[in-house]
Image (spheres, rainbow, N blue to C red):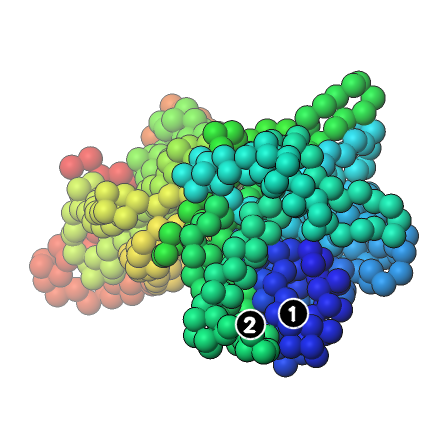
């Protein structure tokens, strides 16, 4: 019998009557049960073989996730069980949806079942029959699990419907789009272009050319249909391309003949007085045969009495358009490649045509619908806010730089040392400038721009920080050294080179770190995602872009250590300088600026660690911290001077000398005024040396007051 449903019934009877049954078309895995069907055999592989090839084919294409739609009967359940086993062995994930085929299907019922499919998966296996095809595939197309962008691979049960016959659909209909570009994997029988195929085809045609003997004999063996169906063959039938049943049917007849001869020899059957081998003995001979045929080497599995699927050929057909009259489209599965096992691997031999997919192109569909990825780009609002802060800070730096240059001849500016004020303005400008490259991401810039920007952030901020705080530290250190010498009543010379040493030391340390970093482990733009930012298909659904590289933590801590030490020392100098009063209380304002900066860094760095996964929040915090550092430094340094100059008319008068202003008692530090008062209160001065000492002490105090404000030109 050709069909499994018929073979199951016949095999039950033949088993009782000890008759060997050999089928050339029944593929149900159920028939491999030797307890139920002890002397059933077949020359076609069971579904267990072809069922492995369907997921194997998709696995070779690269699919890791596959939908499986099958009819839940003996055929479908056994078929899917084999698919399930193969998928588990290669790590393929399958989503199974059974369809109850025991009753007529309706589209609404099928839709409810197909809703269980994951529409994000683009590859599917279909295991059902021609009577189920239209309603299942139409429902699948309407649900978006079939059609353009999808690929279905059908089992051989549909080959008669879609390969050996053509189907016509309305152009653009759900069935048209759901069918076009899919594939069917079926038992092939003989493979064209092979020598055994050509030899078989030649003899096959001769059967039709001999009507008196061969053709008449064949037709005499055809069954009689109660419905009047004519099974007789004609000459034209044998001159058509032989199908798989032609090969497997031939194998069944030849195999039974060979097995019969083997049984006769083995059991000395004479066919006289019931001296004939039994059905079981016939079965044993059949499962031990191995012969060459038009379909290749026929090998029978002794445990299942089925042809091994490794000894059979399989056909992969591509369902394409073979006719078009404008309103209707005719589709048919056309052979794309045949598959055979060479003893080690499955080989695919194509027929010289490319596979055309549902998109109408030869481009293989994506395995999964691309996931919508949250790129976590910097929001436009935060970017605009940060750039605004950067521009404001740079403009303020430029304004104070220009102000210093214009007012450089005013003694109050000269006393504050314009060179240090220039350095502070340049440093804050560079720090504010670092916000610009930091505000870029891959939504607005190319990778090479981002790679450069990543490194520039560190160069701008580090150099700006060093320039600003080295200037503050040097200024405070110089002032403290002069005041300390004044208290000790001794002269001290502090040159410009002396006060610039800390600047060059800090600048050199930063330059070395940044140069090594840039040349050895350059920072680059990276977009990555963590495991919790991926869906069940391992697709990225969220990612962050950031500047990263090797040994990043080591370089960060190197810069933090060097510049942190500079900041702490500057804070210390500002603190010990609080005891020295000046006209503008410059020490106090510098100290306030330093403490403010220390506080914002102390609290800002931990906050950055907490929110580092959010690029917008990170940019907001960094730009705010940078803005506060720049603006706080500038305002605390320059605003008191501007107010003092505006409120003091004598300073605004360019023609006056600094005269008594510099030596005024009101401008001397309290401790120096106290020492002067003690010395002048001594009436018993006994020697000229003492008088000189008092005079020299007064001169030192005058010089200390003057040096506090006036830049040393040495």
Q: Quadrant of residue 414?
A: top left
Q: Which residue is mark 2?
A: 271
> Marks 1 and 2, how far apart in space?
30 Å
Q: Residue furthest top?
A: 326
- Residue 627: x and y, percent? 52, 44
Name the image quarter holding the N terminus: bottom right
Name the image quarter holding the C terminus: top left
Residue at 79% over, 31% down: 168
Q: Which residue is mark 1?
A: 31
At label 2, counting other C-alpha atoms closer than 10 Å, the crowd grade (few under 14, some 14-19, many 20 or more) is few
At label 1, counting other C-alpha atoms closer than 10 Å, the crowd grade (few under 14, some 14-19, many 20 or more) is many
What is the count of numbered marks?
2
Say if 171 sits above or below 277 in the image: above
Can residue 660 be seen in this snapshot?
A: no
Secondary structure of residue under mark 1 = helix
Looking at the image, residue 502 sits to the left or right of residue 433; the answer is: left
465 or 184: nearer the eye? Answer: 184
590 or 706: nearer the eye? Answer: 590
Residue at 76% over, 44% down: 231
Secondary structure of residue under mark 2 = loop
- Residue 581: x and y, percent? 40, 55
Residue at 51% over, 38% down: 203
- Residue 330: x and y, percent? 74, 28
Residue at 30% over, 35% down: 419
């Amino acid at each position: 019998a050709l069909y499994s449903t018929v073979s199951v019934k016949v095999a039950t009877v033949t088993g009782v009557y000890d008759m060997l049954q050999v089928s050339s078309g029944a593929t149900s895995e159920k028939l491999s049960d030797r307890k139920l069907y002890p002397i059933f055999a077949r020359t076609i592989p069971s579904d267990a073989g072809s069922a492995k090839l369907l997921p194997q084919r998709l696995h070779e294409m690269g699919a890791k996730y596959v939908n499986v739609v099958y009819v839940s009967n003996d055929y479908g359940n056994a078929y899917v069980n084999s698919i399930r086993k193969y998928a588990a062995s290669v790590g393929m994930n399958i989503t199974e949806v059974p369809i109850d085929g025991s009753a007529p299907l309706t589209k609404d019922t099928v839709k409810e079942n197909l809703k269980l499919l994951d529409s994000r998966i683009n590859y599917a296996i279909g295991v059902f029959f021609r009577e189920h095809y239209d309603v299942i595939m139409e429902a699948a197309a309407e649900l978006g699990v079939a059609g353009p962008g999808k690929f279905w691979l059908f089992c051989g049960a549909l080959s008669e419907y879609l390969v050996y016959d053509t189907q016509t659909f309305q152009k653009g209909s759900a069935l048209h789009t759901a069918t076009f570009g899919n594939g069917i994997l079926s038992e092939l029988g003989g493979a064209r272009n092979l020598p055994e195929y050509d030899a078989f085809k030649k003899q096959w045609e001769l059967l039709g050319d001999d009507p008196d003997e061969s053709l008449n004999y064949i037709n005499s063996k055809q069954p009689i249909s109660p419905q009047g169906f004519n099974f007789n063959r004609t000459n034209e039938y044998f001159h058509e391309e032989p199908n798989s049943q032609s090969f497997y049917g031939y194998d069944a007849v030849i195999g039974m003949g060979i097995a019969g001869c083997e049984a006769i020899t083995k059991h000395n059957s004479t066919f006289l007085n019931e001296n004939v081998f039994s059905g079981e003995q016939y079965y044993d001979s059949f499962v031990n045969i191995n012969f060459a045929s038009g379909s290749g080497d026929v090998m029978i599995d002794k445990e299942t009495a089925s042809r091994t699927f490794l000894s059979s050929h399989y056909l992969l057909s591509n369902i394409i358009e073979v006719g078009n009259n404008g309103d209707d489209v005719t589709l048919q599965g056309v052979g794309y490649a045949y598959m055979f096992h060479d003893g080690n691997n499955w080989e695919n031999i194509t027929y010289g045509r490319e596979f055309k997919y549902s998109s109408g192109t030869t481009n293989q569909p994506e395995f999964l619908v691309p996931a919508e990825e949250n790129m976590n780009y910097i929001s436009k609002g935060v970017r605009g806010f940060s750039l605004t802060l950067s521009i404001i800070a740079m403009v303020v730096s430029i304004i104070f730089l220009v102000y210093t240059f214009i007012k450089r001849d005013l003694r109050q500016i000269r006393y504050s040392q314009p060179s240090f004020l220039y350095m502070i303005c340049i440093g804050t400008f560079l720090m504010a400038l670092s916000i610009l490259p930091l505000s870029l991401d891959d939504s607005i810039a190319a990778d090479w721009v981002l790679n450069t920007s990543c490194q520039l952030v560190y160069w701008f901020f580090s150099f700006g920080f060093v320039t600003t705080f080295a200037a503050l530290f040097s200024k405070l250190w110089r002032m403290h050294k002069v005041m300390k010498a004044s208290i000790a009543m001794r002269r001290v010379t502090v040159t410009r080179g002396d006060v610039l040493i800390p600047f060059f030391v800090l600048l050199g340390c930063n330059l070395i770190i940044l140069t090594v970093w840039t040349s050895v482990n350059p920072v680059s733009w990276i977009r990555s995602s963590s495991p919790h930012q991926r869906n069940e298909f391992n697709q990225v659904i969220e990612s962050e872009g950031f500047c990263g590289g090797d040994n990043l933590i080591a370089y960060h801590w190197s810069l933090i250590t060097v510049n942190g030490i500079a900041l702490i020392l500057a804070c210390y100098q500002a603190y010990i300088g609080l005891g020295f009063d000046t006209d503008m209380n410059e020490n106090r304002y510098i100290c306030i600026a330093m403490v403010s900066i220390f506080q914002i860094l102390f609290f800002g760095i931990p906050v950055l660690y907490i929110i580092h996964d959010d690029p917008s929040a990170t940019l907001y915090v960094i730009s705010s911290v940078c803005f506060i550092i720049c603006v706080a430094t500038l305002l605390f340094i320059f605003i008191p001077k501007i107010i003092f100059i505006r409120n003091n008319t004598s300073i605004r008068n360019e023609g006056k000398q600094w005269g008594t202003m510099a030596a005024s008692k009101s401008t001397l530090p309290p401790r120096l005024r106290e020492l002067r008062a003690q010395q002048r209160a001594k009436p018993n001065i006994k020697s000229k040396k003492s008088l000189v000492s008092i005079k020299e002490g007064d001169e030192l105090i005058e010089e200390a007051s003057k040096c506090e404000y006036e830049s040393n030109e040495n």
